[in-house]
């Protein structure tokens, strides 16, 4: 089908003003948050209802047109944007932002896929509840995108990842057929768990249009900021609060100094690492007495300031860094974390590599590894991922595989696992129109 005819037919489904087809209007939809992944598209289609999504997919499926589902476009592995010469349609879900009522007894709520995390959090708080996942991109990241990436963030140690909050989903398959598993039943043992299948599916087997979520009861926490000499010392401090941890984050010197330079927030301690530990309930007297570098946030202003030292690292590095940025997201067993930190930093201490920063979700064994180089050669990235895999770690702890790590999937998944995943992809998307090049090469 000719491009013009595709655009006209899509406009017939969603309305002409909901289809963007000029390069300037499509600009922000075809480049990812990091600026590293840049592609092109026939057009961007913005939908309002599951019926529209279904009709768009039926049309694209019939014509063999690739479709890239997109939420807030904050993903960090290039999966939310099409590739160059893709001939794809970007399907933007951000206008599907309905917020259902919060059930006061169960804490269940159903929301549109395009609802931002911040909007969900405000909605939950207004009803006396909280949402279990939080991350710095909260103002733009959507619930559909967070399900599709099985997002992690700062509270995984207490509440688990996105999949743990998800009770049900409404999904449109490549054919346009709709699967709806939104009953919210506590018990339903009737075969395969299709809802969980879509958590972490990265837009490759269906478009999520609505999500049923479990909210949690709000709880008060204390926030500790401590300076540490090593990753092992950081682990041992956080481990004192096992069972009561709401968050446990680590920042190396380079990361925290970069935030300080930009924000003016004074870095409290002279140590190579700082950790933020959020503890449910009160800290017992004596819990921290032996530590030389430690402070408690005394009010909401101090909490915000300490959290900014951690949460603003990504944004500050994106703005400040010169050259090609490399962003990896790895996890290893906690017993290996100190050694892997030292191996990675030793390996990256070589000519041509600059601005090495490691930070992340300490008690998830999850480091974000950032560095810059002059070229976009990915040899160094591959070497770090191989090193992590050799220690029994994962090449993607929480950001997903996207385009960035599709050719490294074998490092974390066995051949039979990849074959099973391909089988699922083929069964649900036989023509391969959904997010080609993401997850599998
Ligand atoms: P997008 O970026 O639009 O898409 C991400 C993927 O999901 C793509 O493959 C896309 O095709 C697919 N997708 C999107 N919507 C749908 C849908 N409705 N149906 C089917 N597929 C869909 N991530 C973490 O896990 N933890 C963090 O702590 C964290 N912190 C971040 C901090 C910053 C400053 C930034 C910029 C990003 C951070 N991220 C983090 C990454 C990102 O925010 C998450 O991956 C988030 O889940 C992406 O949501 P999104 O709506 O922006 O999805
Ligand atoms: C974070 O934890 O801040 C993020 O996942 C973002 C990043 O890796 O830069
Ligand atoms: Zn993270």
Image (tube, rainbow, N blue to C red):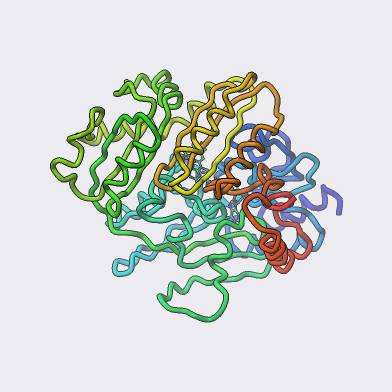
* 128 versus 301 height, above or below: below
Q: Is residue 368 above or below residue 320?
A: below
**Quadrant in the picture for residue 154:** top left
Q: Residue at x 52, y 56 (%)?
A: 147
Q: Residue furthest right?
A: 2
Residue at 35%, 29% (x, y): give it: 229
Q: Is residue 111 above or below residue 295?
A: below
**Nearest to the observer: residue 415 or residue 85:** 415
Q: Please identify the residue farthest to the bottom as the structure is shown.
A: 190
Q: Quadrant of residue 106?
A: bottom left
Residue 292 at what x, y percent from top left? 23, 28
User: Picture coordinates of residue 250 (x, y %)?
Assistant: 40, 36
Specify whether 176 is left or right of 248: right
- In the rendered image, is residue 56 in sight? no
- In the shown orientation, is residue 216 left or right of residue 385? left
Q: Residue at x 72, y 63 (%)?
A: 419
Front position in the image: 178 or 21: 178
Q: Nearer the viewer, residue 278 or 393?
A: 393
Is there any visible trace of residue 5 in the rendered image? yes
> How many numbered discs, if any?
0
The image shows residue 357 at horizontal and vertical percentages of 50, 28
Q: The N terminus is located in which quarter?
A: bottom right
User: Toward the viewer: 293 or 268?
Assistant: 293
On the image, the x and y values in percent for residue 278 come to 29, 43
Q: Residue at x 15, y 40 (%)?
A: 286
Q: Toward which corner of the image does residue 248 lie, by quadrant?
A: top left
């Amino acid at each position: 089908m000719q491009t013009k005819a595709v655009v006209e037919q899509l406009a017939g489904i969603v309305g002409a003003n909901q289809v963007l087809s000029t390069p300037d209007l499509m600009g922000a939809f075809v480049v990812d948050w990091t600026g590293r992944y840049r592609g092109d598209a026939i057009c961007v289609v913005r939908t309002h209802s599951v019926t529209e999504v279904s009709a768009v997919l039926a049309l694209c499926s019939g014509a063999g047109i690739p479709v890239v589902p997109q939420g807030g476009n904050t993903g960090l592995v290039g999966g939310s944007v099409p590739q160059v010469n893709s001939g794809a349609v970007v399907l933007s879900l951000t206008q599907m932002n309905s917020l259902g009522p919060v059930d006061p007894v169960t804490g269940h709520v159903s929301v549109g896929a395009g609802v931002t995390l911040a909007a969900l959090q405000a909605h939950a708080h207004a009803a006396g509840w909280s949402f279990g996942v939080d991350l710095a991109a909260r103002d733009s990241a959507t619930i559909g995108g967070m399900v599709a990436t099985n997002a992690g963030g700062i509270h995984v140690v207490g509440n688990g990842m996105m999949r743990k909050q998800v009770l049900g989903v409404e999904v449109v398959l490549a054919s346009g057929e709709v699967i709806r598993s939104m009953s919210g039943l506590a018990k339903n043992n009737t075969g395969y768990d299709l809802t969980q299948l879509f958590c972490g599916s990265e837009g490759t087997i269906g478009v999520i249009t609505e999500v049923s979520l479990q909210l949690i009861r709000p709880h008060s926490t204390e926030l500790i900021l401590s300076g540490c000499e090593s990753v092992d010392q950081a682990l041992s401090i956080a481990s004192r609060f096992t069972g009561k941890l709401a968050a446990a984050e680590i920042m190396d010197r380079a990361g925290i100094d970069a935030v300080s330079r930009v924000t003016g927030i004074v870095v409290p301690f002279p140590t190579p690492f700082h950790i933020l530990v959020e503890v449910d309930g009160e800290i017992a007297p004596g819990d921290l007495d032996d530590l030389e570098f430690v402070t408690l946030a005394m009010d909401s202003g101090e909490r915000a300031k300490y959290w900014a030292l951690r949460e603003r690292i990504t944004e500050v590095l994106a703005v400040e860094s010169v050259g090609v940025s490399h962003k990896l997201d790895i996890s290893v067993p906690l017993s290996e974390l100190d050694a892997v930190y030292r191996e990675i930093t030793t390996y990256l201490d070589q000519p041509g590599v600059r601005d090495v920063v490691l930070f992340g979700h300490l008690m998830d064994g999850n480091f974000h590894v950032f560095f810059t180089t002059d070229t976009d050669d990915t040899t160094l990235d591959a070497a770090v991922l191989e090193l992590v895999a050799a220690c029994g770690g994962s090449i993607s702890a929480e950001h997903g595989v996207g385009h960035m790590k599709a050719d490294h999937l074998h490092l974390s998944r066995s051949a039979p696992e990849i074959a099973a995943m391909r089988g699922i992809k083929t069964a649900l998307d036989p023509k391969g129109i959904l997010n080609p090049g993401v997850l599998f090469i």
